[in-house]
């Protein structure tokens, strides 16, 4: 049953993953920054998610990314927390530390402040570690803080589903 707080598009992705991950014998770990646990919350809103959802980290602070996921502090210093190298390191770190075949990471600027000319509000980096291979992409979302976070959660889940092997 669709939780009232969860957009139907997000629920559809959760339902798809709830079928696809156990069919492969895989489990999922999440590493979230700007989404603050929305992805993990969406996954665990589904009854039976313990069959395929392993764990999630909300690593909002840079120090947490380093301590919890093993993201090198020098990487954050060189590229910033909202960057491809950091998103990749977050996904790989989550997969390794959780011992799972599928992990996703989200790091971005939800706003309303914190943006810059190079990284405006709405900039979000995603990374997916699927079967040991890490893929990343950047998306710029429009809207207020809630809209950016919701769109990012949906994109993270849909991106994982699209990257699962047949």
Image (cartoon, rainbow, N blue to C red):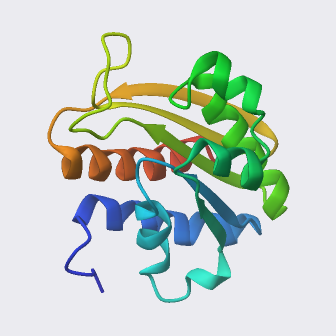
Which residue corresponds to the image point at 48% horizontal and 89% vertical from the top-left?
47
121 w.r.t. 38: above or below: above
Q: Is residue 106 visible?
A: yes
Which residue corresponds to the image point at 34% horizontal and 68% vertical from the top-left?
11
Instruction: Identify the residue at the far left of this view.
Output: 143
| Camera-side residue of 60 and 140 | 60
Q: Residue 21: x and y, percent?
A: 65, 65
64 w.r.t. 99: above or below: above
| Camera-side residue of 141 and 47 | 141
Q: Residue 60: x and y, percent?
A: 52, 51
Q: Residue 4: x and y, percent?
A: 19, 80
Query: In the picture, residue 1 is in which quadrant?
Result: bottom left
Which residue corresponds to the image point at 21% horizontal and 52% vertical from the top-left?
146
Which residue corresponds to the image point at 60% horizontal and 49% vertical from the top-left?
104
Instruction: Identify the residue at the far top of this view.
Output: 117
| Position of residue 94 in the picture relative to residue 9 (left or right) | right
8 w.r.t. 104: above or below: below
| Position of residue 94 in the picture relative to residue 110 (left or right) | right
- How many marks do you count on the picture? 0
Q: Residue 62: x and y, percent?
A: 60, 42
7 w.r.t. 137: above or below: below
Query: In the picture, residue 45 is in which quadrant?
Result: bottom left
Q: Is residue 129 visible?
A: no
| Camera-side residue of 63 and 9 | 63
């Amino acid at each position: 049953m669709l939780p009232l707080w969860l957009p139907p598009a997000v629920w559809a992705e959760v339902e798809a993953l709830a079928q696809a991950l156990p069919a492969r014998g895989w489990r999922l770990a999440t590493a979230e920054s700007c989404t603050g646990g929305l992805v993990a919350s969406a996954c665990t809103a589904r009854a039976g998610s313990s069959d395929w959802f392993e764990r999630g980290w909300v690593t909002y602070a840079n120090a947490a990314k380093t301590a919890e996921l093993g993201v090198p502090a020098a990487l954050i210093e060189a590229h910033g927390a909202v960057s491809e190298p950091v998103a990749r390191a977050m996904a790989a770190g989550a997969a390794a530390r959780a011992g799972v075949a599928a992990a996703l990471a989200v790091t971005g600027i939800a706003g309303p402040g914190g943006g810059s000319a190079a990284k405006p509000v709405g900039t979000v980096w995603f990374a997916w570690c699927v079967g040991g291979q890490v893929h990343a992409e950047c998306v710029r979302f429009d809207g207020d803080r809630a809209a950016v976070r919701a769109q990012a959660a949906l994109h993270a889940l849909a991106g994982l589903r699209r990257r699962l092997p047949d």
